[in-house]
């Protein structure tokens, strides 16, 4: 009888890799990171991530927030 070998499921490895890539995207583009949004097409951040991975232009929220708050002044 041979030794039992445990193989890692390739789908699980892909999910962890997708999570790390999604986290990096959220940091770079200014989106709120939530693990539950992974593979959820109703999530706006996941939709933008898919656009980014397909080579299309994703909205950079850092620039949007800078534009939005540039006119705001505290009294």
Image (spheres, rainbow, N blue to C red):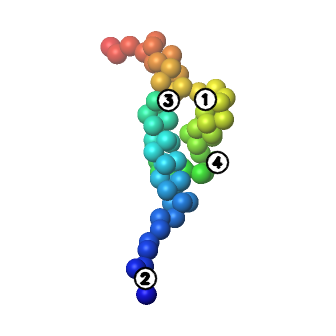
Q: Earlier in the sequence, mark 2 or mark 3?
A: 2
Residue 8 picture location, percent across and down: 47, 65
Q: Nearer the viewer, mark 2 or mark 4?
A: 2
Circle 4 packing at 10 Å, graded few (<14), some (14-19), many (20+), is: few
| Local secondary structure at mark 4 | loop
Q: Quadrant of the C terminus?
A: top left
Residue underneath mark 4: 41
**Could you tell whether 59 is left or right of 71 in the image?**
right
Q: Earlier in the sequence, mark 3 or mark 1?
A: 3
Residue 39 picture location, percent across and down: 59, 51
Q: Is residue 71 above or below residue 33?
A: above
What label does residue 29 carry, if any?
3
Q: Residue at x 43, y 74 (%)?
A: 5
| Local secondary structure at mark 1 | loop
Number of numbered discs on residues: 4
Q: Is residue 53 above or below residue 38?
A: above
Residue underneath mark 1: 58
**Could you tell whether 33 is left or right of 44 in the image?**
left
């Amino acid at each position: 009888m041979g030794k039992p070998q445990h193989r890692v499921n390739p789908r699980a490895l892909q999910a962890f890799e997708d999570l790390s890539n999604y986290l990096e995207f959220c940091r770079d583009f200014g989106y709120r990171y939530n693990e539950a949004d992974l593979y959820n097409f109703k999530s706006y951040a996941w939709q933008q991530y898919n656009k980014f991975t397909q080579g299309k232009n994703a909205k950079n929220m850092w620039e949007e927030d800078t534009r939005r708050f540039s006119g705001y002044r505290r009294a």
